[in-house]
Image (cartoon, rainbow, N blue to C red):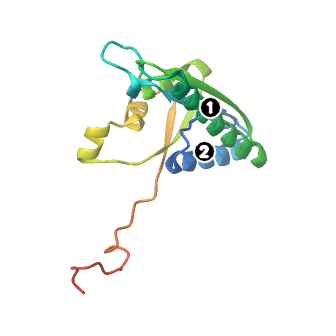
Amino acid sequence: MSPYQRILCPVDGSPTSNRGVHEAIRLAVALQAQLRFFHVVDLHPLLLGDGTVPVAPDLVGTMRRGGEEILAQALQSAREAGAAAETGAFEALGTRVSDAIIDEARRWGADLIVLGTHGRRGVRRLLLGSDAEAIVRHAPAAVLLVRAPEETSPEAAGTATPGSAS
């Protein structure tokens, strides 16, 4: 029996997240593990200083429906691959996305968290934060980070750009 029987995979619909989805599905099938896709509707960017959300309810509803679509797509992919899967969602109002994921892993009893990461470093990570780093540091389970492919600059790809040396 594999040590990984309950795999949690946070999803946000981004290409990076989708790489995590595909890896989580592959592992769930190979290990015959239960897979749970989890989406956080992040309302934090919409908050005012007093903690209220000054947006029309339509925007929050649109965000919810978007999350439901992301979860439905992940669930369909898992089922097509033969993985046992389910979904869950959380609305983060005043809660960091990483904290919501960690809490879900604990609540659901995940023994592995699989998530896509941009792999930001340096100033970009400091400015943007890193949910993946927070999850690795505080998760109650093992964490598998699936990196996005590195963006290739024209120079690295061998393509000349105006002003570059030949």
Dot placed on the residue nearer the N-terminal end, 2 or 1: 2
Relative image position of residue 105 (x, y in whole percent): 55, 25
Position of 76 relative to 107 (above/below): below
Task: Determine the residue positioned at 60% across, 22% down.
Answer: 109
Image quadrant where one finds the N terminus:
top right
Q: Are marks 2 and 1 in contact (CB under 8 Å)?
A: no
Task: Determine the residue positioned at 40% across, 60% down.
Answer: 150
Task: Determine the residue positioned at 59% across, 31% down.
Answer: 38
Task: Determine the residue positioned at 53% across, 45% down.
Answer: 17
Q: Is residue 111 visible?
A: no
What residue is shown with label 2?
A: 21
Q: In what element is the residue under mark 1?
A: helix
Please state which amino acid type lies under the numbered disc 1.
Arg
Q: In what element is the residue under mark 2?
A: helix
Q: Is residue 2 visible?
A: yes
What residue is shown with label 1?
A: 65
How far apart are the alpha carbons under marks 2 and 1?
19 Å
Left or right relative to 40: residue 82: right
Please state which amino acid type lies under the numbered disc 2.
Val
Left or right relative to 2: residue 100: left
> For mark 1, does the 10 Å Cα neighbourhood hold few (<14), some (14 to 19), or many (20 or more) residues?
few
Position of 98 relative to 107 (above/below): below
- From the viewer's side, name the closer residue of 151 and 46: 46
Front position among marks 2 and 1: 1
